[in-house]
Image: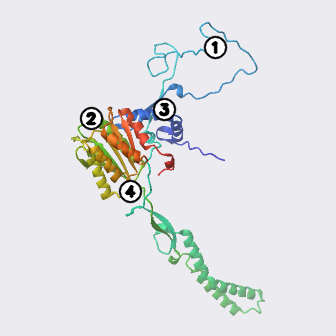
Amino acid sequence: MSYIIDRRLNGKHKSSVNRQRFLRRYREHIRKAVEEAVNERSIKDLDRGERITIPQKDIHEPSFGHGQGGTGSIVHPGNKEFITGDRIPKPKGGSGSGSGNGDASDSGEGEDDFVFQISQEEFLDYVFEDLALPNLLKKELKEIKEFSLRHAGVVSDGTPSKLNIVRSMRHAYARRMVMSGGPRRQLKEVEAEIAHLLAQDSVLRDDHRLAELEEQKALLEQKISSTPFLDTYDLRYNHHVKEPKPSSQAVMFCVMDVSGSMTQETKNIAKRFFILLYLFLRRNYEKIDVIFIRHHTSAKEVSEEEFFYSRETGGTIVSSALKLMNKIIEERYPSDSWNIYAAQASDGDNWDDDSMICRKILEEEIVDKVQYFTYIEITPRDHQSLWYSYEQVQAAHPKYFSMRHITDVGDIYPVFRDLFQRRQHESSGQ
């Protein structure tokens, strides 16, 4: 067995193979740093790279030394301060991140913690590792726009780019054999007769007949050589046909409460959650639509820019957002052709009996159409009426409806990973 190791250098004289091996080795350190970065960053900087620090004690390589060899014994001196089983405390170092003791000295040396930078791509790889949209199905679309090309034999007409050289040469050879078959047989007969005449004595040889045969031979050779080596009749082209293929088209509804009860801090937490979701969708799925819905007393479909940065506010009627979502599904995203997902963020406050209306809309109109509906409630207080109404929906549809509670920024990333963690039966991918 042979192994080929690619040691060519990539940008900045670094080996790509060695870098990937290094990232795998210190995966846990990097994942911890990534989680802290997601929670601490501003909304605009969620997708940039990150500086990773690995403690000096964790990057030591194993080493082997040579002992003195042979058989020997040694006596270690004891002391009156420690007895068998005591654990000796590690000496305390300084307050910095290095390995020194924190005091000035004119001698000695040490090592600082190892710090390196991961790129934006590597950062997002760790952020969204092992995440996937649950229950994603391949559905046949009514208006299919995606096709795969299937080889369907060869044809005599086509474009030069699809020329089948082997089949063309085969046809050319067969044509030449057919067209020159008769002359070749005649040529052999003529050559045999010429050879017979040349073997005779010069006195008895018929020179006139020999001249005729030589002339006939030249004509036959000319006829054989004039047979085209390759003719347009011989050309054969690969033929491909378009076949519709099942599509994994999906749409994600992002529903955010922007009512007066949502404080600026609560809105920022909701925005961070939705930005994580948006990055995840755009990075991992080529064909997916994202619908942004903001609501207070009324709901409105908005652009990405308006969803994240508009300052509009008002009272709270959550059902208006669910009604708008259901209307958009019926008009533009039929459930038999689309994988439909929804993520809703709110502080749980709602107007009077509207929470009961929300539960009714979900159970009667929406849950049967979606692949997965997630609700996150962002509040440090006790749950509100909307949470308890949604609990009944979750109990009836545990596979398609999930709820989580977020109290501060530190909960965003763990909750996000929990909601979209790849299930065991989905490990094969989309």
Disc number lying in front (3 or 1): 1
For disc 1, the marked residue is 84
The image's mark for residue 264 is 2
Helix, strand or loop for disc 4: loop
Q: Disc 1 versus disc 2: distance between alpha carbons?
A: 60 Å
Q: Compared to 214, does 234 lie above or below?
A: above
Q: Which amino acid does label 1 sit on?
A: Thr
Q: Give the image quarter of residue 188.
A: bottom right
Instruction: First in sequence, mark 1 or 2: give its number.
Output: 1
Instruction: First in sequence, mark 4 or 2: give its number.
Output: 2
Q: Disc 1 versus disc 4: distance between alpha carbons?
A: 70 Å
The image's mark for residue 208 is none
For disc 3, the marked residue is 29
Q: Give the image quarter of residue 199.
A: bottom right
Specify few, some or many for label 2: CA neighbours under 10 Å numbering under 14, 14-19, or 20 or more: few
Q: Disc 3 versus disc 1: distance between alpha carbons?
A: 35 Å
